[in-house]
Amino acid sequence: MARFGPAGIPTITKPRDVVKGIEDVRSLGLDLMELEFVYGVWIKNDESGLKKAIDIKNKAKELDVFLTAHAPYYINLASEDKKKVQASIQRLVESARAAHWVGAKYVVFHPGYYGKLSRDEAYRIVRDNLARAVEIVRDRGYNVYLSPETTGKISQVGDLEEILRLCEEIDGLWPTVDFAHIHARERGKYSGENAKEIFIKDLELIEKIVGSDVAKRLHIHFSGIEYGDKGERKHLILRHSDISFEALAEALVELGLTEVTVVSESPILEQDALVMKRIFEEVLHRKGLG
């Protein structure tokens, strides 16, 4: 069955503690939480970090809360500066270590920026550097998937086709499909009356390129989103946006993709996660599946 939860500790959690956040996720009726390493990996590579990780892992296992992680924003695998690339790879590897320690499945990250490079050049550089990162993660025995995410700005490497190509060409990756980012990047792609059909087309493309096993358990980010000529501006509450989660839910159910994991990146994290869970369950019920 599909899982839903917030990107980070729920807004209601006091004190701001990850273990307490996992408890609140479960008490709300949710069953997923993304750990935010976006400003640095706070589970340090030492005894105290390992103890913290074990506490998090045990609580998540006890309450059946599925964990994922988001690597630091300061990653650019398309940089022509070798030091920046090496630092980016190190941040990915550190995120993978921390994710492995807590039992998280996916390490989500933004691949980088085109800069002055052509799209093809940037893609090739990202692919080669990412292959190095995957090799290090594998050699160290970290049982996680590095998970490149579709990005929201047209300056960023990471349209849907690029993310799927990376996952097709490099073993050890799992795509994170942020449909809000795609919507913003393509300036309202899913806003029309035929949104469900467009979602279906993209989901079928995902299944064609990376396979039915991945598509069935696709890792999804979703929220409302504000966008302009350059793509994403900011995330919005679902009801304030022109993208419909119901259309996506109908597409997923119609294709039998019902084991997905869905992270809410809405400003009202857990509230919109609950909205999406309710919508998904209503769609299942209408189809006689729930």
Image: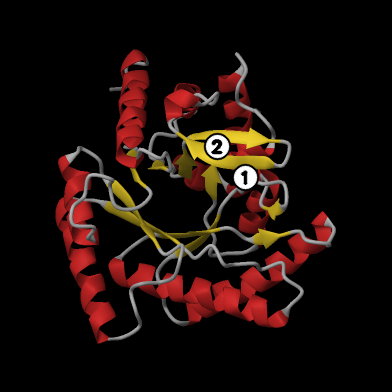
Instruction: Please say whether residue 161 is visible from this viewpoint.
Output: yes
Instruction: Name the element at disc 2.
Output: helix
Against 131, residue 162 (above or below) is: above
Callout 2 amino acid: Ala
Q: Position of residue 191 (x, y in %)?
A: 60, 22
Percent x, y for residue 185?
67, 39
Residue 209, horizontal then vertical, whole percent: 64, 46
Q: Amino acid under label 1?
A: Gly
Q: State the SS at label 1.
A: loop
Task: Look at 44% across and 29% down and name the residue there.
Answer: 238
90 in relation to 62, above or below: below
Whether residue 253 is visible to the viewer of this picture, yes or no, is no
Dots 1 and 2: beta carbons under 8 Å? yes
The earlier-in-sequence mark between 1 and 2 is 1
Q: Can you identify the residue that label 2 sits on?
A: 180
Tell me the distance, in whole angstroms, between the alpha carbons under discs 1 and 2. 8 Å
Quadrant including the N terminus? top left
Q: Could you say which quadrant of the image residue 126 lies in?
A: bottom right
Residue 166 position (above or below residue 250): below
- Circle 1 sits on which residue? 152
Q: Is residue 231 left or right of residue 36?
A: right
Q: Is residue 142 left or right of residue 181?
A: left
Mark 2 Cα-neighbour bin, 10 Å: few <14, some 14–19, many ≥20: many
Residue 208 in the image: state x and y as whole percent. Answer: 63, 41
